[in-house]
Amino acid sequence: MSLLINNPAPNFSLPSTGGKTFNLEDRRGKTTILYFFPKDFTPGCTAEACSFRDEIEAFRNLNVDVFGISKDSLETHLSFKDKYRLPFELLSDVDGTVAKQYDAFIPILGVVKRVSYLIDEELILRYRYSNLFNAAGHIQNLLGQVIS
């Protein structure tokens, strides 16, 4: 399945480090960034998470909430969030179902791609940025889209 910009974002529910189940439908009326990443505690994923952390006020000032998604367990996410003081929730997609819905899964390797989505208040996909090796590029590209 290929996701198209300006089409509805697929709805899903996942466990969150906030202690509740995250449901995309509950985000209606709010702008959301979903960023998919391969694995907690790896160099690139740590850099990306810390970059989102460091720019979180810029996103908040634009009324945008950030959520990270990987196949890591909720327990691993909680450790990762705590160690790097991440001020946003991480969602646990252990079986990769949501990553597959969002074209963020590499089946041959069984890993999640580094891909980010901007979803508007009506739950419409407005922007997609995919770059496995440029973690910082995700933050700058998403900020640029939100501002424009």
Image (tube, helix red, strand yellow):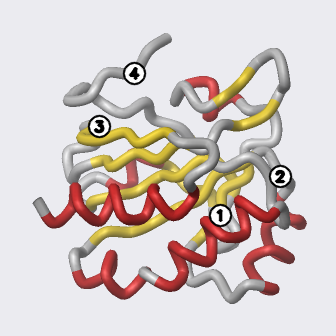
Q: Residue at x 44, y 14 (%)?
A: 2
Of the numbered discs in the image, which one, if any, rests on residue 72?
2
Q: CA distance from mark 3 to mark 2?
A: 24 Å
The tag earlier along the polypeptide, 4 or 1, is 4
Mark 3 → mark 1, Cα distance in angstroms: 20 Å
- Label pair 4/2, CB-CB below 8 angstroms: no
User: Residue 59: x and y, percent?
Assistant: 33, 75
Mark with earlier residue (3, 1)? 1
> Is disc 4 in contact with disc 3, using a CB cutoff of under 8 Å?
yes
Label 4 sits on residue: 3
Q: Amino acid at mark 3?
A: Leu
Q: CA distance from mark 1 to mark 2?
A: 10 Å
Residue behind mark 1: 90
Q: Position of residue 54 (x, y in %)?
A: 50, 85
Q: Residues within 10 Å of mark 4 (few under 14, many from 20)?
A: some
- Label 3: state its secondary structure: strand
Residue 23 percent location from the top left of the image: 50, 49
Quarter holding the C terminus? bottom left
